[in-house]
Image (tube, rainbow, N blue to C red):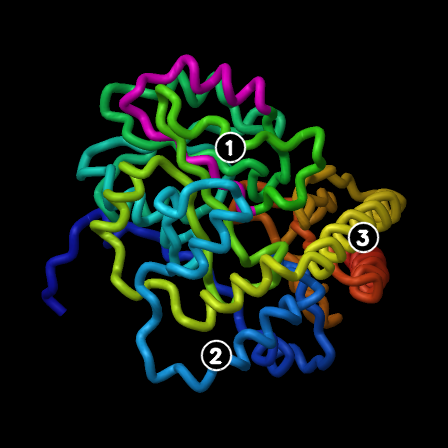
Amino acid sequence: MKLSVAENIATLVPYPPGKPLEELEREYGVTGSIKMASNENALGPSPKAVAAIAAALPNLHRYPDGSCHYLATRLSAHLKVDPSQLVFGNGSNEVIELLIKAFVAPGDEVVTSHPTFLVYATMVQAHGGVNRVVPLANLRHDLDGIRAAVTPRTRLIFLDNPNNPTGTVFNRAEFAAFLAQLPETVLVVLDEAYVDFVADGLRLDAREFLGGATPVVTLRTFSKAYGLAGLRVGYGIMDQEIAGYLHRVRQPFNVNTLAQVAARAALDDTAFYAETLRMTRAGMAWLIPRLSELGCTCYHSQTNFFLVEVGLDCRQVYEAMLRKGVIIRPMSAYGFPTFIRITVGTAEENQRLLTSLAATLRELAHD
């Protein structure tokens, strides 16, 4: 072909999607696999959300509510913010892209960390922006380094708190000091996809910083604690003026009907939410000491996943675990060639992971 493609698009590295579970089972000749790689909710979706979806099915011939009116009304009461401060997206990923579309012109700069959520840098490059990347310090965001990387061309800063893939957090005092030293022309995006799992004493309330001198947007999702990853519904909380700019660049029906009704119902499923947090924290407390006994180094996390240094090529460990029907995440793409990332599962899944990893490490040690 003789098509002309801009260099920022031609040089993009696509996000590496995982194969469907059924295809992996066919390829590796296994059945009954478990997936502990994508930070999904091991309990499944909220039962109240499933019931709400079933009730909404007869209305699928209608377009979705483009304003997400009922979801915004319910969520604003839950969060104690005004509905006009909420912007919904096809997952919080879309809100990330909306922010870049609205505020980053070609040649403008965006500061991110490494390693962090891969979508930030990808979307910045796709829209012609310039990524300025600051390495983590001791697996945490280097807030001093990020502040030093800000230039007159900086438009956005992306901070995921907790960080993916390390699960580390910064606290309120650190964040407040960071904001106080930034110019008012920079928009700070605080991605709180995993905020539900953060221990109470470590959680900062991002809403406190809305309307300050340095603008802040916080992102959240229904994919993790509410078990709705397959429906793709996330949102941002922000100043009304910022929300207005995002509405200018978003598609009119960007959140589908089933996602909207499921998210509303999930907010009311307090028992499911509480059990998700209990299971996750208990599972992590059970897994980490037992993996440590295998000779692994585990890193405590404020999310539903954690990093494990296995001391071997993580791709080899990943392949060997696949053959046992256990899917984990190798971390070579994040710059950690001897690390894997494990999502906490049910008690049965956690036991199977432990048994399979113990066997894998013995096998690879003797190769």
Left-right relation of 55 to 365: left
Q: Which image quarter holds the N terminus?
A: bottom left
Is 185 inside the magenta-drawn segment? Answer: yes
Q: Amino acid at mark 3?
A: Gly
Q: Badge 1: few (under 14), some or many (20 or more) residues near its Cα, within 10 Å?
A: some
- Residue at 82 percent across and 65 percent down: it is 352
**Could you tell me which residue is drawn at 72 percent across and 38 percent down?**
299
* Cα distance in 3D space between marks 3 and 2: 34 Å
Q: Report x, y in % for residue 19.
A: 53, 71
Mark 3 Cα within 10 Å, few/some/many (few <14, many 20+)?
A: many
SS of the residue under disc 2: helix
What span is colored magenta in the figure? 172-193
Based on the picture, tell me whether residue 132 belongs to the magenta stretch: no
Q: Which quadrant of the rendered structure holds the C terminus? A: bottom right
Between residue 9 and residue 206, name the one nearer to us: 206
Along the line of sight, which residue is nearer the eye, 285 or 312? 285
Disc 3 to disc 2: CB gap under 8 Å: no
Is 195 placed left or right of 123 in the picture?
right
Q: Pointer 2: what residue?
A: 56
Give the quarter of the image for residue 243: top left
Give the labeled residue for mark 1.
Answer: 206
Residue at image mark 3: 283
Identify the element where label 1 is drawn. helix
Left or right of 106? Residue 30 is: right
Residue type, numbered disc 2: Ala
Q: Does 234 sit above or below residue 45?
A: above
* Residue 238, image quadrant: top left
Q: Earlier in the sequence, mark 3 or mark 1?
A: 1
Question: Nearer the N terminus, badge 2 or badge 1?
Answer: 2
- Give the number of the mark in front: 3 or 2: 2
Q: Is residue 99 visible?
A: yes
Tell me the CA gap for discs 3 and 1: 28 Å
